[in-house]
Structures are given as structure tokens and as C-alpha cells.
Image: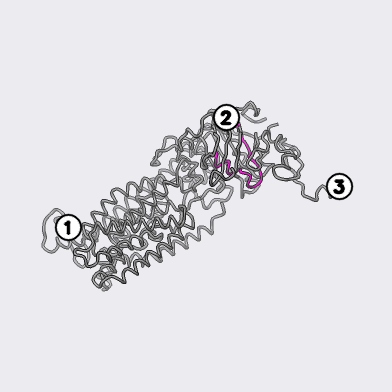
Amino acid sequence: MSPALPLTAAPTGPSADARDAVARLRRAGRRRLTLATAGLAALLVGLVLLRVTWGTYQVTVPDLVRILGGEVIPGASFIVLESKLPRAVAAMLSGAALGAAGALYRRTLRNPLASPDILGVTSGAAAGVVLLLAVTAGQAGGSTDLARAGAALAGGAAAAAAVFLAARSIGGERFVVAGIAVSAAGQAVVAGTMLSLAQHDLQSATVWIAGSLNGVTWGRIGLMAAALAVLLPLGAALHAALAPADVGPDLAHALGARPGPTGAAALAVGAALAAAATAAVGPLAFVALLATPLARGIAGGRPSLPVAALTGAVLVVLADVVAAEAVGLLAGGAALPTGVLTGAAGAPLMLWLLLRQGAVRAGARPA
Amino acid sequence: MTTTTPAPTPGADPAGLRLRGVELGYGPASAPPVVGPMDLDLPAGRVTAVIGANACGKSTLLRGLTRQLPLRAGSIDVLDRDAAALSARAYARTVALLPQHPVAPEGMTVAQLVERGRNPHRGLLGGRAPGDDDAVASALERADLLGLADRDVSTLSGGQRQRAWLALVLAQATPVVLLDEPTSYLDLNHQVELLDLVRGLPDPTGRAPRATVVAVLHELSLAARVADHMVALAGGRVAAAGTPAEVLVPEVLATVFGLDADVVPDPLLGHPVVLPRGAGDRGAREGAA
């Protein structure tokens, strides 16, 4: 009665060739990841060094070492410790936060447009900060760094919650559309509130809204560093736990993962990271969106949160070097807010990524 | 027989999956169940084909078997262990699923995709587990994908891609494998190739010569070719269960699909082959006679 089909014999294990081939491929992938991480880290150190030593005011490396060692060099010490170094550190930390946030959004939502800056978190955080500025305007001392960070976190969380409530689920087109709508609403709140600000506050708010490292203080940097010390390891763990979700929710579930709760936690951590960066340096356009695909390219297709964070850090430090020093020094223009540069460079890069995405989609057959 | 396993003797087989009073559904508990209440035994170490018309509860049943959809009532025993007592990861080391529409991530190689199947064998942070390379290599070899291991998944043909998904499930190394319409979108030759691969799946735990396979299949004659055991569903209930020759009979086909059909044995392999009859077919023959 049984159809006489040939049956494969019981398992005997893979051939030595197959095992070697698989091990070779895995080692090659790992090597690529290690190289990408090391290369980006070296590039980041070089850029930070360039940012601190080079520019309208130059500092030699021996002088920098002496200043960091605690020696006081009149003029140079002040410029390095109160302007150049805090900017470089803020650029590095905010870039890392945005890069990691983008990687968490991208992996959870599996959509090339999924990033906290497109989906409303960044503009929600900005709206929180601008509202705080409006409320505290004219008060002695104005807003503290802690209040500003709290306002950014509350705004970002409110935006993320609004997106989740409107979409009623994590992922899919609805989530992206809801995010874009919330983002627009956040920008409307920012624009409307700015109109009510007094002349003095308006000036600083305008620069901050463009995404600027100008006004960054060690206090804000300390807060951001403390947030990152908790959020980055947590984000890395969630990012790794979401690996099975890359193949869709049904299969992820069958692989023993819980893509729903893990994804919600990943989005919450990503939103907090983006809000922490926004509180410190304002909404830097496109960094979170761009860092992930660039990092994937650098790491040979392997999604990796550390590589995305390093890519984000390199992007922001590089943008700050160009916007604050190179434009003024080489092209004779005025220094730009860093966010203007990330936006100007990010828009064409994003279009290119979308076109490439379309080409891949068109080339792929239906599964 | 060229088989290395004894001929299946349904009835004497131990149950791979044992369902008792199982009810599955969506929405509020007051809504009528999509599946059940259902008692069902699926034999261990055998291929069971689940057939039925669209919306008869086939996919819902599979979602219940993977525990993606919680049971409203009843219990499921997998290889004589209560499914509810197993953790998510332990369950994923026992039961694998190839869903109907898996998502092919961009920029991933075949080897990386297949490696995802190792997830339930790893720690929470996804560090490598011993045996990963062996399992991935075996899966690639069995699916005949070793030569394509470093290719981007999005560049594969439909048949190759479906073999890659099956290799992922193989790398999961589970004694129970569930397949939801694995042959959709494939050319006939690739359907046969894939189903023969499914029929030869070994039990990686070594408990039995072959894995316990449950496959939802559309093509009745192909299902009869691959299956040792067959279950026909209608309206969320079991309409018939048994060998393909017992289930694929005109009366069951009429009940389950509302289909008028003749059934003849395959001249070479002996399994039943369904010959569907349209509304005018019999009348035309009688008119001509």
C-alpha cells in the first residue's frame, strides 16, 4: 500500500567538505564584522582627534596631551576643554545613540524607512524641549539640563506611544504611516511654540532645532553618557534577541523567539536612545535612518548594533568637522549647525538607498 | 521496496502528536472556534498530509501546533510530552514550522539564512552553540544547496529558495516538522523534488528513523504520493483520517471539497490519484454513449 519512493538513509552527519565550507563562510563573515568594527573605531578616534586639534583654532597633539593631562595652557586649555572636546564627545555619543536607535527600529519593523527620526520620536522629543523652553521662558536660570532631558524623553515617549496606539500593532505599513503623521504633528508643535518664544529664547531654540553641537555643555554630555551606559548594552541584547524576527513573525515564533514583546522593548529602548541624543544636541536629521544601511554595507550584510552605533558616531563627528570647521576654513563660509549638514547629505543618500531598494525588489522573484 | 524503514502500519504507530479536545479560534472566547473540538492522533516517524478546502482550519491547526495561537481548550502531547509544559525554546527544539509566507531578508546569504534555524539551540544572546556548523552543513547538503551557500537569498529561483527555507527548518534539527503548503508557487518538477526531500527527512534525535512530518498540501495526488497518513478537514473538524487510499475516496472528496471525482491507483507507485469531474463531464459521456 505504501508508495515505493526512495527514502534517504538515516543521518550520518555532514561530509567533511560541507562542514569545512560552512565553517569557512562563518569565519569569513565574522572576520568581516571584526574588521568593520575595528576599522570604524580607528576612523572614529582619528576623526575625534581631528575635530579637537584642527580648525580655525589649531591645537598641536603634544599640547592636547598636556591639556588632557591637567596642565593649563592659557587660551588653548579653555578652547579645548570648553568647546572643542565637549563638541567632539557630544558628537560621538549622540551619533552612537542615533545609530543604535536606528538599528533597533530597523530590525524590529523590517522596513527601510523605519527609524526614530522618520517615525516621530525625534520630533516628539524636540517638541517636548521647545515646550519646556516656552514654559520656563523668563524664569531665573531657565531650564536645567535635567529638565531638558526629561522633557525630551517625555516628548519622545509620547510620540512613540501615539504611533503605537494609532497603528495598534508593531510593524507593517500602518506603523510607518502613523509614524510619519506623528512626526508631522511634532514638527507643527515645534513651529507653533517657537512663534510664542521671546526674541532671546527664539535665537537659541532655532539653532538647537537645526541640530547643533554649539551649545552643548558637560552637564548635558554627562546625562547622555549615563543614559547610554544603560541603554546601549540593553539595546545590543534586544537587537541580538530579535535575530529570528528577520525571517518574519511566524517563523520567529517557531524558532522559539517572542518577536512581539521583544520588539516592543527594542522600540522603547530605541526611542529612549533617540530622545537622549535629541536632548543633548537637538534633532540631528537622517543619522538614525542612514547609519543602519551604511553599517550593513560595511559589515557585509550582517546586521550589527555595535557597527551601526559606530557608523552613527563617525557620521556625526564627520558632519561636525565639516560643518563647524571645514566650511569656514576651506570655503570661506560661516559655520553651519551640524544638523543642517547631516540633513543636506542625508536626503540624497536616502533617495539613493530607496532607489537601490526598488531595484532589489524588482529583481527578486516572489517567494 | 527500496526503503530502509519498515513499511508503515498505521494504528500500531505511536502518536507523534496527540490532540485531545483541542479548540482554536480568534477573537473573544464567545466567538465560535475555527478548529475543533478535535481529537487527533498523528503517527510518529511518518508523513501526514492535511488536506481540506480553503478556510477549513488547516493553517489555524498548524498555528495551534506551533503554540503561536494559544489553545482555547484541550491539550496537545508532542512525542508523549505535554506541549504546555515546555518552554518556548525547548518547544522550538522539538517542533519546527515552515510557514506559508516566510520573509526573505535582504542582503542575507543562504548560509546565514540556514544558520537562523540554530536559534533555539543557542543562548539568549545568540552565541554559537556546539554542533551549529555540522547542523548547517547537513541541512545544506540534504537540500542540495552547498554550492549556493554564499549566494544572496534574493537571487535564488523559487525552487531554490523553497529548498533554502526547508534547509533552515532542517538546521533546527527537530524530531517534528510542520509545513504549511510548502509547494505553493513551485513548478511541478520542483514540487515533486521538494516533497521527496520532505519524505526522506530523518529524525535528528535518532529516536526514530524518520521525522514526524505534518504538511498542509493542496495538490491531492501529490499529497497521496508523499503521505503515509492523511487527515481531511472540513469546517474545523476531522472529516476523515487514515491512509491516503482510505481518505481519498469519492465520498470524502464530495463531503470535504464538494467535488465530484473518480479515484484511480497510480499505475507505477500505487497511491490514489484524484480525477476531478466537472458539472457536465458525466452527462457528456452518458450522452455520447
Answer left or right for A162 relative to B148: left
Discs 1/3, front: 3
Q: Nearer the viewer, residue B87 or B222?
A: B87
- Dividing the picture into quarters, in which one does residue A201 lie? bottom left
Q: Chain of mark 2?
A: B
Residue A154 point in image, percent of width and height: 33, 56
- Dividing the picture into quarters, in which one does residue B211 lie? top right
Residue B152 point in image, percent of width and height: 49, 51
Q: Chain of mark 3?
A: B
SS at mark 2 in the image: loop
Tell which circle, 3 or 2, labels the residue nearer the N-terminal end: 2
- Compared with A12, A40 (above or below) is below
Name the amino acid type tagged 1: Leu
Instruction: Report the Cα–Cα distance between label 1 and label 2.
Output: 71 Å
Residue B126 point in image, percent of width and height: 40, 41
Find the magenta span and give its range: B43-66
- Compared with A190, B212 (above or below) is above
Instruction: Report the Cα–Cα distance between label 3 and label 2.
Output: 50 Å
Camera sees residue A73: yes
Q: Is residue B46 magenta?
A: yes
Residue A249 point in image, percent of width and height: 49, 47
Name the amino acid type tagged 2: Pro
- Evaluate if marks 1 and 3 touch, with contact meaning CB atoms under 8 Å apart: no
Q: Which disc, if any, is residue B209?
A: 2
Q: Residue at x 47, y 36 (%)?
A: B134
Q: Nearer the viewer, residue B77 or A108?
A: B77
Discs 1/2, front: 2
Camera sees residue B7: no
Q: Which residue is mark 3?
A: B286
Quadrant for the N terminus of chain A in the image:
top right
